[in-house]
Amino acid sequence: MKKEECLLEYLLKMRELASKGQIEEESVIEYVIQGINDDPEHKFLLYEAKTYVDLKKKIEVYEKIRKTRTPSTQSVGQRFRKHNENKGTYSPGSVGAKGSSKTPPNQNIIRRCYNCNGVGHFASNCPIPVREKGSCYNCGAKEHQKRNCPGKKKEDNTTNVISTETQDPYMVNVKINVKDDCQTECSYNLNSLIYTGSPISVVKVRYVTENNFNEGLNPNLNFVGVNGSKLDILGIFNTEVFVNETVLPIKFYVVHNSTMSFNAILGRDFLNTKGFTFTLGDHLKIISNEFEKVNNFDEILNVDFKVGEEIKSNKEVQINPCLDYDKKVEVLEVYDNFYLCNDSPKIDCNYEMNICVKNDQPISFRPRRLSFSEKEKLQNMLDDLLERGIIRPSSSDYCSPIVLVRKKTGDLRLCVDYRELNKITIKDNFPTPLIEDNLDRLRNKRYFTTLDLKDGFHHVRVAESSIKFTSFITPLGQFEYLRMPFGLTNAPRVFNRFINLVFNKLIRANKIILYLDDILIATNSYEEHLDILKEVFGAASQHNLLFRIDKCAFLMFEISYLGYLVNNDGIRPDPKNVEAILQYPIPTNAKEVVKWALFLQNYDYELQHRPGTRMIHVDALSRANNILVLEENTLEQNLAVSQNLDSSIQKVKSELEIRESTKFELRNGPVYRKSKRKLLFYVPSLMESQILTMCHDNFGHVGVDKTMEYLKRSYWFPSIKEKVKNHVRNCLKCITFSPIGGAVPSELHNIPKGNKPFVTIHIDHYGPLEKTSTGKRYIFEIIDCFTKFVKLCSQEHQNL
């Protein structure tokens, strides 16, 4: 961009250049902003534009701001660096650059000497001898340093990091108080940028020591800069700032010194401070809002809240990383207020599982053997279930064996083999949702939240009369379930009935989708999604249902659900389901093929014989398939259809419908050419090439006369002879296999050179050339074949 060029003209030229090629609008906007000759901190406003219309409005505001700068050719960042270079040393805890003997006029900057720590001069003009290296800055002694100096005076530790000259509209002076390593309170006056594009407030680490900020951060909250790079947050600094004679609380995110050119940035969280109204104009105006004071504030905060082991912290909540920071905070607030801290009255559905069997014959097994390590882990699992009240010791006549199944994490899961009990159990008929129906309801949805219930089946009690059927035997004793276990044939249907009872209102309103213990929320809008999430958390909390937060995902744009990947564009199979097959190594030699064949033999199946008395209904007619017969059109049918597409034939046909013609005749729809003895079919132009190929190629590539003879038996079309000649002349096979006429060229033979000079010589003329002064135009060449000796003679003509 040229210096004298207007920004709007520059934008117009860039748009014209971009219109000549296929360049995206966002890329053009980025090129335009990069081409503006200014510091990046001044162009923050422009980076918020997403369209040309937005960029034009931002440029108008940006030009007004740029005109207010003093001087106009010097950026704020440059003035900051220049001011830092002109400052001397500071009081304890201050940070500054090297001092300079030159101080800009009309600027209220403190001059402090590095040598004597005095005010009013620099070290180059200090009257006191130069302090030795490593000695105290305060008294000059070598035994201690300045922070431990006994003669240190209590003085004002306020450090003017940036001078208070005329500021830009979005610049403000902020005073903060921090403590140095010696717990001495120091103050800084930081010239800060008010930037509404940032959701947080940021400060450089040079103004905050390590003992002032907390390094614990939520890993789910990531921040990026204007250029898209991730910010490295060192910690959080909660403090109070003094702005325009007003004390405000603020939370600073501490970053490295090289992250930005400003000392601090005040974001939207600062402008949203409760109790204050901010007005951004020529100057920042802060208005305090009056609220009614509450005396017994401690009683309001007196909440009896206990966090159990089953409740996870906010750090484990998986929220869509593409959401804005404000939306993430809202989701966390909903999670805290409606799930963790929900104190609504609890409801007991009094729902129990009843097991009905077909006969009273008890089923019992002996315990299966386990290794010593498995017994230790089994004992821990049994102790945990006993402590939680899920099982109890049993003396029932029924007892099923157990199986220890290894999880994906490597831990063991206690499972009971209820197969024999399931054979005699009367089945429950409550319907299970169809996967296809659930997937159909996800069409055109944008936001998805999946919730997974923890110990889902254990939320349902087992009826006292049915507890004896759940008994299982282990090497460590016999136990029975008080809560519904996994493995029972009716367990999924009973649990589905229980979940439908808990979330009945939401299911009837089509707000959630259930499949066993998986709860899915799918909406088009963010606000509707939060409202439904509040209702789900409320209903779950009332019925003491707990979620596995580490397996829950909130407001995702794409999720894996029932073996499919679902997003706003549609559904597709999840690649993880076929990952083992896709990644299976391909056999590269015969030995590996043999191993693969042996591996396939592990797939076992059994052929069951069905007697003929049960196969009476099977016959040839019942197995006959519907056959679709396709019959190809004949050449005459294709010619008749093609006549209707030929404009010249249609004109002839229209005339024949009115009057008779001496050349053509219309018979049963097609048009024919009259001949002396018979009628010839008028071939349309689209079929001429096919007819020529049939009469020439299919009849042995005969000549023009024979081809004409075959054609005139049944067909006619305009300029038939010329088209036949052209077709035969350009036939590749005819050209390839036709004999070559004329004299047969003989082979070339080399002329023998001989065994001595001038036995064989070559002579020739070269010319005509430009005439010489003597009128000669030709060169007579004589070359000896043996020695390659050359003799050239000039001649007027070619006659020797």
Image (cartoon, helix red, strand yellow):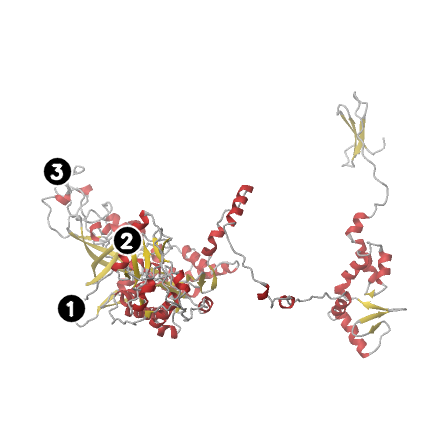
Picture coordinates of residue 791, whole percent (x, y): 77, 26
Given residues 180 and 600, the one toward you in this image is: 600
Looking at the image, tell me whether mark 2 or mark 1 is earlier in sequence order.
Answer: 1
Foreground disc of the pair 2, 3: 2
Q: Is residue 521 visible?
A: no
Estimate how packed mark 3 is, as few (under 14), some (14 to 19) or many (20 or more) residues with alpha carbons within 10 Å.
few
Give the Cα distance between marks 3 and 1: 54 Å
Picture coordinates of residue 214, whole percent (x, y): 23, 54
Picture coordinates of residue 784, whole percent (x, y): 78, 25
Q: Which residue is mark 2?
A: 380
Question: Residue furthest toward the bottom?
Answer: 658
Q: Which residue is mark 1?
A: 299
Quarter of the figure with the N terminus: bottom left
Could you say which disc has been placed on residue 29 in the image?
A: none
Give the Cα distance between marks 2 and 1: 43 Å
Estimate how packed mark 1 is, as few (under 14), some (14 to 19) or many (20 or more) residues with alpha carbons within 10 Å.
few
Question: Residue furthest toward the top?
Answer: 756
Amino acid under label 3? Glu
Count of numbered tags: 3
Foreground disc of the pair 3, 1: 1
Picture coordinates of residue 474, whole percent (x, y): 32, 55
Q: Quadrant of residue 481?
A: bottom left
Looking at the image, tell me whether mark 3 or mark 1 is earlier in sequence order.
Answer: 3
Given residues 145 and 381, the one toward you in this image is: 381
Q: Is residue 288 left or right of 546 when viewed as pictured?
A: left
Q: Are marks 3 and 1 in contact (CB under 8 Å)?
A: no
Q: Is residue 668 visible?
A: yes
Q: Is residue 601 above or below residue 719?
A: above
Could you say which disc has been placed on residue 143 in the image?
A: 3
Secondary structure of the residue carrying tag 1 is helix
